[in-house]
Amino acid sequence: MKVKNNSFSGGYVFNLEGKPQDKVVELEIPSQVCIPLKQGFGQVVEPTVEPGEEVKAGQIIGKSDNSESTPVQASVNGTVKEVTSKAIIIEADGTSDWQPVEGHGSDWTSMSAEKIEELLYNSGVTSLDNQGIPTRYQSSSISTDDVKHVIIKGVESDPYNLSLSALLQDGKLSQFADGLKILHKILPQAKVHVAINKNRQNLIKELSNLVGSNNWVQLYSVEPKYPQGSDKVLIPTILGKEYTVGGSATKLGVIVFKMQTILHAYDAVVEGKPLIERLVSLSGEGWKENLHVKVRVGTPVEAITNKCLNNGNYRIVSGNILADQAVTSYKYPVTREFDNLSAVPEGEGREVFAFVRPGAKRASYSNAFLSALFSNLSSNCDTNVHGEERPCISCGYCEQACPVDIFPHLVEQYTAKSNVDDELIRYGIFDCVECNLCTFVCPSKRPLGKHIKQGKQFLMNKGYAVK
Amino acid sequence: MNGLRGLFDNLKNNESLSAFKPAIEAVDNIFFGPEEVTTSAPHIVDKNDTKRYMTMVILALLPSTFAAIYFYGWRALSIILVSYMAGGITEVLFAMIRKHDIHEGFLVTGLIFPLVLPPTIPLWMVAVGSFFGVFFGKEVFGGTGRNVFNPAIVGRVFLSIAFPVTMSTKWAKPVTEGLGRLFNYAIPADAITSATPLAVLKTGGVEALTKSTSYSELLFGAVGGSMGETFRIGIILGGIFLIITKIINWRIPVAYIGSVFVLSAIGNQFLPQVAPPMYQILTGGLLFGAFFMATDPVTSPFTKSGMWIFGIFAGLLTLLFRTFGGYVEGVMFSILLANSITPLIDSVILNAKFKPRNDGVVYNEN
């Protein structure tokens, strides 16, 4: 199969130290899990268990058939300790077996689409990713007939990513290929596009051998430039400029999934495994070892940090360290959407002569450090601001880096002074995908992303809405 | 280092010195990086900051600076120091009155300004020019990021108009063998001359210029001119360094130098007084102006097409001033005029690029 090669203008390729290695370790069952009743896509579900009840791993403990939602399962065997409107707390008994979903089997090729949809719904897999997996159970905001394109992303463009080779080792690539075919059974009219990091040519070739004969699949080899993995940037890159996302991609008939979602779908249909466990990568310099852990859903983050975090001051960020929020309390549970936990060192010390260091291990958007000469060396990162806030000098880095071709410094000039009116819509303020790359590259350390977001909020409060 | 840290903390917390806080913090920030951390997404930021940005420009200017000292003696260093002090005091006063930090842009202005002055200039004139440039070129417009004109050029143009004789006739022959003037302080009176290659061109025509100077003399600085503009090979290397490190955009120097080259090649065919292209780009302050002064990010356009228009406009004006104007050198005035139309260029390009849209965003009256 011919593999297509697309990209977008702008962006920045990250090469940070602390990338997760391909080792996978299963974390032991915690003593207590906290299962939120709203995970992934969907509304909050009603609990179906009482405190004191014995539950098995995989048993549905929260379900709302009449709303756009997906059931929530218990992730461990044990007793329900507390039920609130937001979460269910279960005391685990330490056993690791799980109750399979009824109706699963390895004969998925002969299963009907309705049967597969039921398996995916009851296992909780339909809640994954930004729009969920559409089934007839209202698990997604789009119905199965309206889906025209499905994009599976394995771009690895974020500063820290789940490693594809760790996800797909031990023969999981053929399971992934089967997962694509399972998806094709419930969305037969949709064209499937798989976008993979172009540095993984072996993976692309193997996948091409497995699914290449099907005409509803197309493979793409994309450069892992941040923010290629962001939905709003990926969809126009893969499908063309006509597919510019306004409010939601589902209005264009497009759904985006991560690769782990397809593996979960295969597990649910063939092995009956409900969504009780996630593969989470531990990235960044704060962990003792950068590996991947298999974690039960609902495990508190402190179960991971107590075992794997170094001594010292680190900031734990779930997801993308440029766009997502930090985990403020370690009691917060690992939910279904987690796939990366980064531990970034807090850079609180005052560095001596910080601005004249040659910087072989300091990467920068400008090539002003020695790291520009040694591009294969990975660089350190910390949370220090690395400079005082200064007025904008129109250096142009933000507009060069911006993936959606707006001029961040122009928009920020007005929003910083709260001088917001609808003229800014013309300059593309609503095109912004909030990747925060402009804030990252600014040498004057201006809070560009924050001000642009405030400007958008101001306009939305005034009554403007994105179609 | 702990002692230094303690000293700065004491000075910053001292109540009676609170008026001088910008100056104390500026010195503190040279020695120590900031201690603040990011509060929300993005959690990491680029390690480059404005101090390093300006340091890169100073690094690129170092070949010209050392050449100035080599050709014209240690007085060149005094001129640079006076320029930094006079402009620096102005910057510090404004920072104290306006109660904001001292901004790093002056590090570059303070070095570019003396490098475009003749080496025989009296020190008091340097101080007046530096003060004028910082005050009327930058601070009255609102400070860093808001100025329309390049402050170094404003200072230089002011000196050219206020003190025309010193600025246009008192050039010096550089010493280019052995250790140059490294053992001298000032230039001896008998080396003062009024002939630079462009002056020879103006009085004697193209023939006189091509007979008296060769390309290598122009490239390696064996001719008269302002202190920093003669060592042209150093300027070219510095400019390429800045383009590789992405400090300046390549479009402006290419547009400026390219348009001078092309237009003078055409002009040379029709008008006898226009110098041929290679001489045109190797004489005068063109290379210095194109790489270091026209590329100032605040005063040049930020749109890519705007940069081309800016460069071509400045190139055309340079040729017009050199050929038909009364002054022998046209670079300073043409960059000044090009700076003045930068906002217009940007707004025309933005209007063309961002058409009013009625797709994608709706307005609900509720």
Image (cartoon, coloured by chain):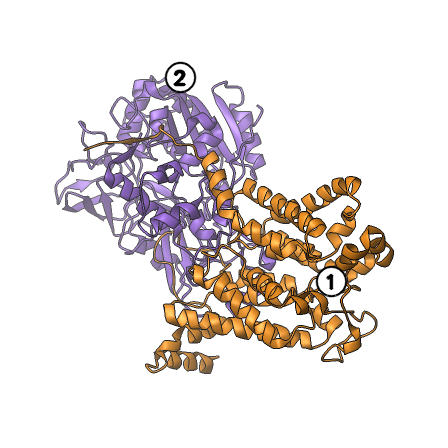
Q: Chain letter for mark 1, please.
A: B
Q: Quadrant of residue B76?
A: bottom right
Q: Determine the residue positioned at 78% across, 61% down.
A: B220
Marker count (numbered): 2
> Is label 1 in a helix, a strand or a loop?
loop
Relative height, residue B79 to residue B225 (above, below): below
Write down which chain is painted orange: B
Q: Marks 2 and 1: which is nearer the front?
A: 1
- Quadrant in which the C terminus of chain B appears: top left
Q: Are marks 2 and 1 in contact (CB under 8 Å)?
A: no
Relative height, residue B43 to residue B118 (above, below): above
Decide if residue A95 is on the left or right side of residue B4.
left
Q: Which mark is residue A177?
A: none
Q: Position of residue A373 (x, y in %)?
A: 63, 55
Q: Badge 1 is on which residue? A: B231
**Residue B46 is at least partly visible in this image:** yes
Decide if residue B324 is on the left or right side of residue A260.
right
Between A307 and B63, the residue placed more toward the observer is B63
Q: Dot 1: within a 10 Å radius of its alpha carbon, few (fewer than 14), some, or many (20 or more) residues?
A: many
Write down which chain is painted purple: A
> Is label 2 in a helix, a strand or a loop?
loop
Between A327 and A241, the residue placed more toward the observer is A241
Between A299 and B68, the residue placed more toward the observer is B68
Specify the amino acid type for callout 1.
Phe
Q: Badge 2 is on which residue? A: A189
Q: Position of residue A46 (x, y in %)?
A: 16, 36
Specify the amino acid type for callout 2.
Gln
